[in-house]
Amino acid sequence: VAAERGGYPHFMLKEIYEQPRAIRDTLTGRIADDLSRVTLPELSWSDDFVQSMDRVHIVACGTSWHAGLVGKAVMEKLTRIPVDVEIASEYRYRDPIETAGTLVIVISQSGETLDTLAALRDAKARGRHVLAITNVVGSSVAREADDVIITWAGPEIAVASTKAYTTQLVVLYLLAVYLGQRRGTLEDGTAKQILAALAELPMAAEQVLDTAPQVERFAREWADARDTFFIGRGIDYAMALEGALKLKEISYIHAEAYAAGELKHGTLALITEGVPVIALATQTDLYEKTLSNIKEVKARDAFVLGVTFAGDEEMRHSVDEVLYVPRTLPVLAPVITVIPLQLLAYYAAVARGNDVDKPRNLAKSVTVE
Ligand code: G6P
C-alpha cells in the first residue's frame, strides 16, 4: 500500500497533489488548438436536440452534488437554460416538473451510488435523456446513461473526494461553453477567454499547492476548534459548502457553510470571540457585499481567514489572515479555491490523529439507500 501511495502518507494527500495532472487529462483533446471551441465527440447531439433543450436537472450526492451547484451557476450564465440541482435521494421521491426538452445530468465519481443510479433509471423510465458525468468507465451509471462524459481523474481511493470533484467542475465548464456556443448564447470572444483560462488551470492548480505550509499552520491552530464557519456568496457559497463538508468528513470538526448575506438571519448568534470563519471572496461582482459580511463577523471577534485572488490588498485590512490563490476568471475560481480547503481538512484530520483515508461511518461508494 505504501508503494501505491507513491511516497505520500495518505491517498488523500496524493490525490490532492494529482489535481494539476487530473485537470490537464480531463481537458486534453476537448479544447480546439486555437481556443475557439469545445469538442466533445462523445455527444452526438443534433441541432434540434440542442435547441429544444429548455431545462436541465442535475442530480447527484455529496461532493458530486456540490459540483452540480457550481454547474448550475455556470450553465445558467452561459446557456440561459434554467438549471435545477437536486440531491438524488430527494429527487427520487418527489415529482419533478419536467418537459420533453429536459436534459437530466447525473454526476457520480464512482458511477455506483445507489440513489443516483436509481434517479437515472427513473428519469429514463419517464423518457428523459440522461447524460452521465463519471470517473469510472464501465460503471453502472456510465452503462445506463444515454451519453457519458468521463472525468479523467484516475482511481480515487480516499473516501473524501478531491480530484474527482475538480475534474467534475472542468467537465461542467466544458459542457456549459459547448452548449452556450451551440445555442448561440455565448459570444465567441467570451468563449475564447474562458477556454484560454481553462487551459491555464493545471498551472494555477500547481501554484495553489504552494499554500500547503500556510494551510497546515492554520489547520494545526484550529485542530481543537469546536465549531467553524465557511461563508461566501454566489459560487463562493457552493465552495463554502464543499469546504465545510471536507472538514466534517475527515477532521470531525463541526463546520457550517452559510451564504454570507444570510448569516444575520440566525447563524450570526453563534459567532463569538475566536470562532474560526473562512470567508471566500473571489466573485468580483459580489466582493463588496462579502466584505461587509466579513466586517459583521469581525465585529463579533471571530477569527477570519479570507480567501481571495493574489493581488487583492484590500482584504488584508478586514481579516486576520489572508490566503491568496492564483488569479483566474471568477467563474473558474472553484477549481483553485477548493484545493486549500481540501488541504485544510487534510491537515486538521492529521493533527487530530484521525484515519484520514477511511473516516468513521463513511464509505467511498454508497450502494445502499
Ligand atoms: C460518498 C463519498 C463522497 C461522495 C458521495 C457521492 O458519500 O464518501 O465522497 O461525494 O458518496 O459519490 P459519487 O461516487 O456518486 O460521486
Image (cartoon, rainbow, N blue to C red):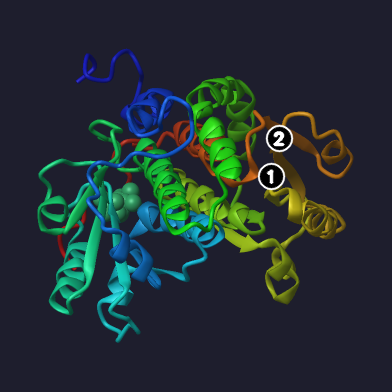
Q: Are marks 2 and 1 in contact (CB under 8 Å)?
A: yes
Residue 111 lies, in percent from the top left, at 19, 51
Instruction: Decide which of 16, 192 is in the foreground and name it.
Output: 192
What kind of element bears circle 2? strand
Residue that carries the numbered disc 2 in the rendered image: 309
Estimate how packed mark 1 is, as few (under 14), some (14 to 19) or many (20 or more) residues with alpha carbons within 10 Å.
Answer: many
Residue 323 lies, in percent from the top left, at 69, 33
Picture quarter containing residue 322? top right
Q: Is residue 232 left or right of residue 86?
A: right
Q: Residue at x 30, y 86 (%)?
A: 95
Above or below, 327 relative to 262: above
Estimate how packed mark 2 is, as few (under 14), some (14 to 19) or many (20 or more) residues with alpha carbons within 10 Å.
Answer: many
What's the mark number on residue 282? 1
Above or below, 145 relative to 265: above
- Could you tell me the amino acid type at mark 2? Phe
- Could you tell me the amino acid type at mark 1? Thr
Residue 52 lies, in percent from the top left, at 35, 71
